[in-house]
Image (cartoon, helix red, strand yellow):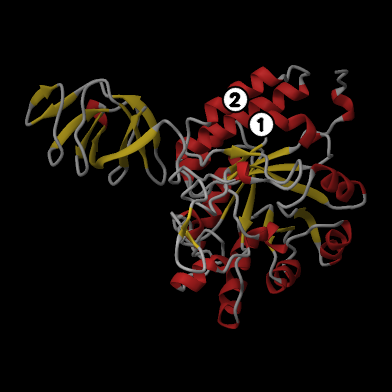
Amino acid sequence: MSFNKNNIRKPELVMGIRNLASLKACKGNADAVYFSLDRFSLRSRAQELDAEILAGFVEEVHEGGIKAYLAVNSVIYPQDLAEMDKVLDCAACADIDAVIAWDPATIMKAAEKGLDIHISTQANVSNQLAAEFYRSLGASRVVLARELSLEQIREIKEDSKLEIEVFAHGAVCQAISGRCYLSAYLLGRSANCGECTQPCRWEWSMLSDNGAAVDVEGKYLMSAKDLCMIQHLPALIDTGVDALKVEGRLRNTSYTATVSECYRHGLDLYMEGKYDINKAKHLKDKMALEYNRGFSTGFYFGHPGPDGLAHEHDMNASPVKREAVGIITNYYPQKSAASVKLLERGLSIGDKIIIEGNTTYLEQEVSSVVHEGHKVTSTERGSVVGLKVDELVRRNDRVFKIER
């Protein structure tokens, strides 16, 4: 393959994050991050950020040379208008680089405040005329619908004056552009307001008209595999897109660190003319050790068939499991140690652990454990122990054991 990097624009790598810990995990890898406040996003469980700390958080993002995009992409009801307006005022004051939106009310208000606007994939932009419509409203970028092929994306990019962003990795919704009503119907919690309970990930059975069970060779009949395009970066970049997006605002910090590192490495390899399928496979295998539902290429090479569904996996297909251990109750900087309340399980010397919180992310091996003043090799659930730690940790940080 002849390669001329001067003819190719390097896409921006956009990572989904939820707090300072996940920001730190992708610093040096991400070109931009997107996140939300505790309201008006499709990830309402991401509650760590609010309007009061937004400016400081954006400053942290910018200090790392990274752009900050705020998702305000839920449905806006009449009672939400005043509060949504306040959120956008906060975004303008915080020097947000762009607001991700699709509700016309949010778009209109963001434009009035002079905010740069990226159109959310919720808008289901599937052609160049739709993209141009949003440009006429003031948008500078559209995140295309996930149900498009590479050729369709290329055509839209060639015929559009906007920046084009597409998803490269992460969870895939079984509904078109995430417009799902199953959660609202079953449990009264709307996915379009960020409260999806993910019933598509549940174990389902199929019955015939007479009530007999139908064998469909799978238990999780609607659970889509995660998108993974690391082995097809050349084809994705060749469409001319301006940004590649990674979904995962609710994934653990280890996922953010690993996936951002792999896509950064893959993009850099390609721009240096060193990308090959074996290196890409190594990166994919590395990401498969993090939480995932199996991998597919979505709609990029045509409509996905049965191989795009995770029939047999109960949420996580990774061979590596995170087992909750307990909670940090205190940190002693002079001793480089922490006290840990073992709520769920014990610890032993040599265990691989992760400690994480809103601002903490630490991976290490257990090297020293003290119980009731004595060094021990293992401890049981229910005890409080002293743990040697490699870095600063904080009260209420969670401790997880990593098992293969």
Image coordinates of residue 293 in percent, x first then y, are: 51, 42
Please determine whether, in this image, residue 280 is positioned above or below residue 217: above
Task: Answer with left or right where residue 290 lies relative to residue 119.
Answer: left
Q: Amino acid at mark 2?
A: Leu
For label 2, the residue is: 283
Q: Tell me how far mark 2 sits from mark 1, CA to CA.
A: 7 Å
Please determine whether, in this image, residue 216 is positioned above or below residue 29: below
Task: Answer with left or right where residue 62 lies relative to residue 132.
Answer: left
Look at the image and tell me in which quarter the N terminus lies. Answer: top right
User: Residue 135: which disc?
Assistant: none
Question: Foreground residue, 194 or 100?
Answer: 194
For label 1, the residue is: 230
Asked which secondary structure carries label 1, the reply is helix
At horizontal 57% and vertical 46% (from top left) the residue drawn is: 309
Please determine whether, in this image, residue 152 is positioned above or below residue 230: below
Question: Foreground residue, 186 or 163?
Answer: 186
Task: Indicate the quadrant where residue 243 lies.
Answer: top right
Question: Foreground residue, 144 or 394?
Answer: 144
Asked which secondary structure carries label 2, the reply is helix
Please determine whether, in this image, residue 191 is positioned above or below residue 22: below
Asked whether disc 2 touches disc 1, contact meaning CB atoms under 8 Å apart, the reply is: yes
